[in-house]
Image (cartoon, helix red, strand yellow):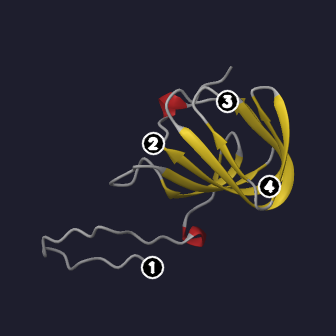
Amino acid sequence: MDPAYPPGSGKIRNWTVKHVDEQPPEGGDCGERRRLFSRDDPSPAAFIHRVRIRDAKPHYHRVATEYYYVLEGEGLMVLDGEEVRIRAGNCIEVRPGTVHSASGDVLVLVIGVPSISDGDILYP
């Protein structure tokens, strides 16, 4: 629920509440995602997406750092060519320039700082 100030009040809230089930699912290079916060929001300091990863394509970012928190499942991430097993409870930091991909059936919360633009998704 995201209550609003009355129209015309001139007030702007300094907070936002969203629920993942209220966000539409989207397809993408990494699997199915639901955007909680993203660059389309009024103040996108970071993006936060819940993603069901299924064979994510190798890619990297020049600017953004990504944090993957594994909510459920097990899989494999490839980080600059090195294979890393991941499972629920892992948190992975992926710094700019790191070519990364993932496989398996893994539900993750991905936080990107700063919010990733289309121009910051690059393929090797």
Badge number at residue 36 = none
Please name the residue that numbered disc 3 is placed on: 59
| Residue highlighted by disc 1 | 1
Q: Residue furthest top?
A: 124
Q: Which residue is mark 2?
A: 114
The amino acid at mark 4 is Val
Q: Give SS at disc 1.
A: loop
Viewer-side residue, 26 vs 52: 52
Q: Nearer the viewer, mark 4 or mark 2?
A: 2
Q: From mark 4 to mark 2, how far is it between C-alphas?
A: 24 Å
Dot 2, how many residues are within 10 Å of its Cα: few (below 14), some (14-19), or many (20+)? some
Amino acid type shown at disc 1: Met
Disc on the earlier residue, 1 or 3: 1
- Label 1 vs label 2, nearer the camera: 2
Q: Position of residue 49 (x, y in %)?
A: 58, 55
In which image quadrant can residue 57 be found?
Answer: top right
The residue beneath circle 4 is 106
